[in-house]
Amino acid sequence: MSHRPGEGALILLDACCVINLFATERAGDILVQLPYRFAVSKLVADEEVLSIRHVADPDGSVERERVSPRSLEEMDDLTVMDIATPEEQDRYARFAIDLDDGEASACALAVVHGGGVATDDKKALRVLEKVSPRVPTLQTPDLLFEWALLSNTPEAEVRRMLRAVRDRARFFPRRVAPHFSWWAGFFR
């Protein structure tokens, strides 16, 4: 089983975690408060469809709001990393056999740079555990639980944020996800 990342550890966010964080409308606050160095692969930033649901008007019509590569590049506490070295390319190719490009790029960069991966993708978690069990992993509930504790955010605001993740990112953690009970408690 993967271990927890230490303070200051590099954490590569995959597309689902980026979408979930942006759905809260407080991604920058969250990243700056957590004790990690966050990065996203250039492939995720440039090529993945990072979009969040947005209710456009009172009649309930829904539009998609895109998280632009530029907004990721301009975040102070997020680094965009490219797969450039032969070692990164080799690791990427190996992970891409089993995973989508976004997850494969996050895993490859984490392995090469001694970092961890933040993903909610069940297959990515399983592949990482098998191929690189020493790579620490986090999931969206880990990130938001830890942030809520560190920031002393009022419960009403945490509830609003978790509901935004559910409604705008269409994400609700699996029962086996870390901190599931904490998350689900906001929906009772």
Image (tube, grey):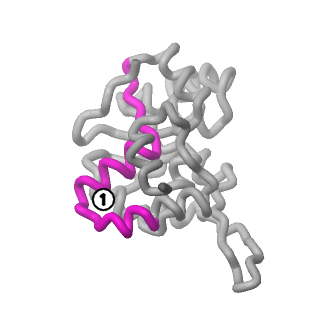
For label 1, the residue is 32
Between 121 and 101, the residue placed more toward the observer is 121
Residue 32 visible, this angle: yes
Q: Residues within 10 Å of mark 1 (few under 14, many from 20)?
A: some
Q: Give the answer, above or below, for where 13 lies relative to 167.
A: above
Residue type for callout 1: Val
Residue in view at x 34 percent, y 49 percent:
145
x%, y% of residue 14?
A: 54, 43
Query: Residue 59 sits in which quadrant?
Result: bottom right
Residue 140: x and y in percent read 46, 46
Image quarter of residue 160: bottom left
Q: Quadrant of residue 169?
A: bottom right
Q: Residue furthest front?
A: 188
Left or right of 152 in this view: 185: right
Can see residue 83? no
- Asked whether 157 falls inside the magenta stretch, the response is yes
Which residue is at a point 51% across and 14% down the rendered structure image?
A: 130
Position of 138 compared to 125: left or right? left
Specify start and end residues of the magenta stretch as a single range.
134-160
Residue 11 picture location, percent across and down: 39, 40
Residue 97, magenta (yes or no): no
Residue at 60% across, 63% down: 67
